[in-house]
Image (spheres, rainbow, N blue to C red):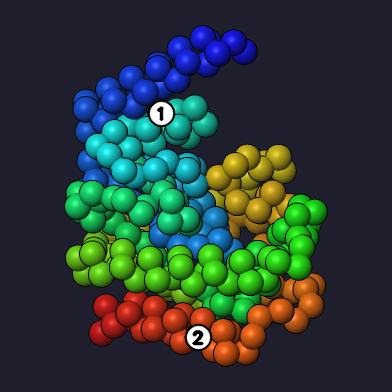
Amino acid sequence: MSIAARSGGQFVKSFAAYAAARWNPQCRHDRAIFVLGHARSGSTALSNVLCSHRQISGFGESHVTYDNKTALGRLVVRQIGRRAWKPNAHYIFDKILYDEYDRSVSKDFFKSHGVFLVREPGDSIRSILNLLIKAGRANSENHLSISHYYEERLKHLIVMWNNFSAQNRVGLSFSELTDDSEKIVSLVSDKLALNPPLKNAYSAPAKSIRRGEGDPFLAHAYNRIMGPDRASTIAVGTDDLDIAPQRMEALQLLYRETVALFRADRT
């Protein structure tokens, strides 16, 4: 494709995003739902459950950067491109796992509904390593770099959590999600006031997983949130982590603080 053709295509997408943001009533933050978490936290299964609801339009992680008023328009354009857009849905959905996409959000972003999801650090790091090993991208530097990603993401999630009002946020842990999925799905459904309520079920993705749809190796094998012994994010098959015990203790403390914030909202 020529440079001119690419530039023309980009202009069309930009204009479409602007038009959607301006005229599509879905493109309001009070009609947006975001799963805010980190890699290998169980977010794919939860996103699939949410996006299976007739009133929620989405497909998973869109990689839209929420830095200006056209961001929700860009989200609609990406959903159209993936044939996942539901024009009659009340809510529009996205999943955000990296700070680069929600680092510079506007105040309006916090009018959205935030579903927060985190996982214990050791299992998170091991699960990310498992995925890198399968993809042939693992090396000796991964352990520490993944721990830095995990730490910075949880710190950012705490900041984001504190900017949402209590009625617009719900926080979950991976262990809750997989140990008692029916209860957690009901909790999320009630928080979003969905009618009919969410069900712990979704159509299994195709084997050729596209970007944004989760684990390209195992996600196609499931059609519901699974227990911890069968989840596609299971953390097995890696050696002991090459991370200092003091650092792991600090990450554990950060994780416990995050979960405590989440659970304080339920009392």
Quarter holding the N terminus is: top right
Q: In this view, does 92 lie above or below 259?
A: above
Residue 72 visible to the viewer: no
Q: Distance between the residues labelled 2 and 1?
A: 41 Å
Quadrant of residue 159 in the image? Answer: bottom left
Disc on res. 226: none
Badge 2 marks a residue whose secondary structure is helix
Q: In this view, does 66 lie above or below 25?
A: below
Residue type marked 1: Val
Residue 84 visible to the viewer: yes
Residue 37 locus on image (x, y percent): 45, 62
Image depth: mark 2 or mark 1 in front = 2
Which residue corresponds to mark 1?
Answer: 77
Badge 1 marks a residue whose secondary structure is helix
Give the class, few, some or many, for how many residues have Cα within 10 Å of label 2's Cα (few <14, many ≥20): few
Residue shown at 69%/65% (left/top)?
Answer: 142
Quadrant of residue 39 in the image? Answer: bottom right
Which residue corresponds to mark 2?
Answer: 250
Residue 7 locus on image (x, y percent): 47, 15
Quarter holding the C terminus is: bottom left
Residue shown at 44%/81% (left/top)?
Answer: 254
